[in-house]
Every structure is written in structure tokens, then in C-alpha cells.
Amino acid sequence: MARKFLRDMREVDNMLHKVLARYRKGKEPRVPPGQGMLIGFLMKNTDREIFQKDIEAEFDIARSTVTATLDSMERKGYITREAVVRDARLKKISLTPKAVESHNRIIADLEQLETIMFTGVSCEEAETLFHVMDKIKANLSNLYSKGGKSDGNQDNR
């Protein structure tokens, strides 16, 4: 492979960060990416009660990290935590109207950015890209689950 995939991915990642920073400039309130992902998770799961342990499991992050993130989001007015009747130790996490508004604005911005990113890319090319990305994610997930050890099989190209 003449081109280096990881280098290209890093360039795209850097460009996305720069574009997103410009895109968000002047738009308040600014939601950090991690908190935005958590808001998105809560938005997708409005049909059930979500607790801290659910977030820990979904994002595979430590309890202390989730606690700090939720504390920050509560201070900023994005979430509320309420004890549930069946067990006062459990705190149900709910989004505030401020979080829903931020989420809707972020989704609209990201959809607009994706439209721009895929200008000149055919549907077939986009589907191929997504197919390849799914394979790469599966390979990396498999490697991660093995503790970072590869079986050496490189013949799936």
C-alpha cells in the first residue's frame, strides 16, 4: 500500500477538529464532545431509565470518569439526577430542555457538515467507505478484545 492509511486518518481527524472548532465558534453553549456523545446516548434511550452504570457499560469508561462528567453536566444544566422509588441509591439521569436543544442544534450542524464532506462522492463510493470502515472497526475491536495482540492474519485485504 503506497499511501499510509493511519497517516490519512490522522489528517482527516485533524481537519475535522479544526473545521468543527470553527463551526462551533460563537455558538453557545459549547458542549464538549464527550458530553455531546452522552447527551446523544440519553436522547436515543428516552424510552427507558438510564443510570450511571448504564453509561459506564455503554462507553466502557471508569466510574470516576462518569461521575465527574455527570457532575459537570449537572452543574451546566444539561442533566438532572433523581432518586428512584424502588432504590434511593439509584439516580435516574434525565436530560433537561437545554440539553435537548443543544443536541438538536449539534445534529443539524453535523448533518450539514456531512453533506459538505460527501460533496462529489457517489452513493456507491460512500457505501464502499462505510463497508470498509465497518471492517476496520471490527478488526480493531477484535484486537482490543484480545488485549492488543494480533493473530498475524493479514490476508483479508
Image (spheres, rainbow, N blue to C red):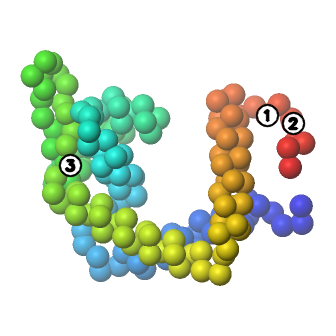
Tags 1 and 2 in contact by the CB under 8 Å rule?
Answer: yes
As drawn, the label of residue 93 is none
Residue that label 2 marks:
153
Q: Residue furthest front?
A: 123
Q: Secondary structure at mark 2?
A: loop
The residues tagged by marks 3 and 2 sit, at their Cα atoms, a distance apart of: 45 Å
**Residue 150 badge:** 1
SS state under label 3 = strand
Q: Amino acid at mark 1?
A: Ser
* Image quadrant occupied by the N terminus: bottom right
Q: Nearer the viewer, residue 89 or 157?
A: 157
**Mark 2 or mark 3, which is nearer the start of the sequence?**
3
Q: What amino acid is found at the position of numbered circle 3 in the picture? A: Leu
How many other residues sit within 10 Å of disc 1, few (<14), some (14-19) or many (≥20)?
few
110 or 4: nearer the viewer: 110
Circle 3 residue? 95
Q: Position of residue 100 (x, y in %)?
A: 23, 58
